Amino acid sequence: MTITYALIQMLEKVAEKTNRARIITKAEVFKLLQNGPAVVGCEYKKAGKVVKEFGPMILASGGFGADFGADSLLATYRPDLLHLPTTNGEHCTGDAIKMGEAAKKQEKDPDGGPFPAYPSGKTWDEPSGKTGSGKKFFHNIIDGSKVPTEPFYVAIITPVIHYCMGGLECTVDAECIDKKTGKPVPGLYVAGEAAGGIHGNNRLGGNSLLDCVVFGRVAGKAACKFTFGAGEKFQPCPVPKELKELSK
């Protein structure tokens, strides 16, 4: 969250100098507004009030590594991981993914690709011996320094839930894909850990922030193109009459 707070502070400074951007904090988006298959806005709660905003939506609330409830995404897709601790903050409950699911979008590999457990090193040694392809990397192992006297310190090492590979399926332009038609949902985009299938079943270390930066920019450009069109002229979102009542 440290990085997020720093980014929000910079965005707030930008918003102070222009009326072309508003930064709303301490608000909870809980529903996507639709006009047929198209997403045309959202509803959010702030200071006890429900507010509607209209325009293309970019879902970027992160993964679900701390979603441990009985009806959580972890319980639904990876119940075998519910006993593990997580490095994620308590805010990582997959809210964007849940809203996308509610709007009938397609999840991409929500289980993250479970892998079989290999309890023995023989899994690797035996095939290497048979094929003659094995190689000894360490010929001389040097023991670490011994601790002859107390106190002795013990650390518990355990697997943890760190990053979610699964999320809402999207195109290379960060467009959310409709579960039924397999086509992009007009006005709905996804970026960061909420997007599924970006890294496959596992990601390279250090590539999580890169994913956020790349698809954040891609989603932003795609949403702008959707709003302004090919002629770069503003096109109002096709909002039905029943959704036009705004709570201010």
Image (cartoon, rainbow, N blue to C red):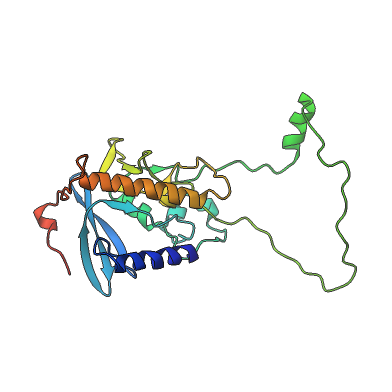
* Identity of the residue drawn at 45% across and 41% down: 197
Examine the image and state in which quarter residue 156 appears: bottom right
Find residue 175 and report its horizontal and vertical position in percent.
32, 43
- Name the spot of residue 73 as percent of width and height, x first: 43, 54
> Residue drawn 38% across and 54% down?
60
- In this rendering, the answer to whether 87 lies above or below 141 is below
Q: Residue at x 47, y 48 (%)?
A: 211
- Looking at the image, which is closer to me, 110 or 183? 183
Quadrant where the C terminus is found in the figure: bottom left
State whether residue 166 appears in this view: yes
Question: Looking at this view, is 197 or 6 the one in front?
Answer: 6
- Regarding residue 187, the answer to whether it shows in the image is no
Q: Residue furthest front?
A: 17
Which of the pair 4/240 is nearer the observer?
Answer: 4
Of all residues, the one furthest to the right in this rendering is 148
Of 175 and 117, which appears nearest the observer? 175
Q: From the viewer's perspective, is 12 left or right of 207? A: left
Q: Report whether 67 appears left or right of 80.
A: left
Task: Write the residue at 18% across / 49% down.
Answer: 234
Q: Position of residue 148 (x, y in %)?
A: 90, 68
